[in-house]
Amino acid sequence: MSEASAEGSRGSAPLSLGVIWAYCLPMIGMNGIGILATIYLMKFSTDVLLIAPAAIGMILGLGRVWDAISDPLAGHLSDISKAKRGRRRAWMYASALPILASSVMLWAPPAFVTEATLVLWMGFAYILYETASTAFWVPHFALGMELSPDYHDRTRLFAYRHIVGAVGLGCGLGAVFLVRTASEPRAMALAVSLVGGVMVAAMILYAALRVPERKEFQGRGAANLLSALRDVFRNRHARLLAFVYVLETFGTASIGTLAPYVMEYVVDAPNLTEVFILMYVVPALAFTPVWVKLSRRFGKKPLWLFAMSATTVAYSMMFFIGHESYVTIFAVVTLLGIGSGCGSVIAPSVQADVIDFDEYRTGERKEGAYVALWNLLRKAPAGITAMITGFVLQAVGFEPNVAQSEETKTALLALIGLLPATCYAGAVVLFWRFSLDEAEHARIAQVLLARRGEL
């Protein structure tokens, strides 16, 4: 570490493992129910509930439209909240039970309703689920951004977050398997959502109780929402990251939604769907310590650029998989997992550095506003991808639970391969221009410490 960087981190002891584990614990539950929805909600809706693909695609897309309102609002409100339990933790407490209730509603709609009523039920349940999740995700992520001011300790924190989150992904895959293979999938979906919802609520409440907040940041949010968003867009580093996230999310969104369709209708191996996802998750988890060490040696930007470039190549190869091409598909998915894992560790650490730059410019701490906007920009493309998928499948004549035409198979491969490869290539070109490196952050940290009287 450079002398400047060392001085910029002076006075900030590394986060204790107790605080880190308490902060990361909800990732198990939230990723568990999240991956279940990401991978299987659309297929469950089309193949079990028999909702038209365009209808469920529209519901998922409208959920992202609602996020355009709820995410920035939750971020700003958590920035300016003055609750005794902390401006972030108060929101975490409030989100726990609504997440439990909405999760059960989403996976256990009444069996006796008409098709139109079922669509309305799913729409309402999904909006409620997204709202409750936002009330947790945005303040929780913002809390992580402000836990440590150290350039490299942030990478360590989000590496642990990624590892713990991977456990949640494994739990979610187990839930997908249980629902997908159940003789009574609706009954199994009810049981899984109920157990998962209770676990999520308990983990959130525990984290809210145990994780501290920095008192010096209380009451330092922007005066109003428009002012906060204006500052975000005036931050040149934040603007660039926003475009990168939009492109990157168009890539990552496709693999979860389309994996069950590709494994069943293209590879002809539906029973390997969970293995497909595991081959994505395990490398992402296994390489986490490597990314922490390499980021110290080579820097966050070069490492993330390398990962995005490798991911671009891997997605391009996805277009060429076919019937029973097991070796090719699992090799490609493994490479995708490695690249995605690097981004999951490095990106939040880079975000925290960008928020410090905002404090340097404005004197305010607006983690909530930044996280909300980035969270929205990462979720919106996922909803658009789901909407596109629904309309494309319906346009090419997709019929559930039967063999598909070559046109439908090609459409599936284009959506899971060519579209994300193109997006990742664009993200590489954009991120090449990112300039907030360790040396610049060290200079900013010195100024911030001086302002707070900590030098």
Image (cartoon, rainbow, N blue to C red):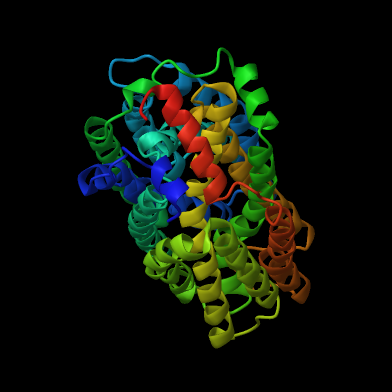
Nearer to me, 439 or 415: 439
| Residue beneath the point at 47% across and 48% down | 349
Q: Indicate the position of residue 388 as horizontal and vertical percent values.
A: 72, 52
Identify whether 306 is placed above or below 320. Answer: above
Screen quadrant of the C terminus: top left
Nearer to me, 97 or 232: 232
Q: Indicate the position of residue 286 as horizontal and vertical percent values.
A: 38, 70
Nearer to me, 72 or 20: 20
Q: Indicate the position of residue 185 as horizontal and vertical percent values.
A: 41, 57
Left or right of 283 on screen, residue 395:
right
**Can residue 214 be seen?**
yes
User: How many labels sit on residues?
Assistant: 0
| Residue beneath the point at 49% across and 47% down | 348
Identify whether 129 is placed above or below 77. Answer: below
Nearer to me, 436 or 195: 436
Left or right of 390 on screen, residue 108:
left
Q: Indicate the position of residue 109 as horizontal and vertical percent values.
A: 45, 40
Identify whether 405 is placed above or below 340. Answer: below
**Can residue 53 be seen?**
no
| Residue beneath the point at 57% across and 60% down | 304
Screen quadrant of the N terminus: bottom left
Asked where in the image residue 82 lies, by quadrant, the reply is top left
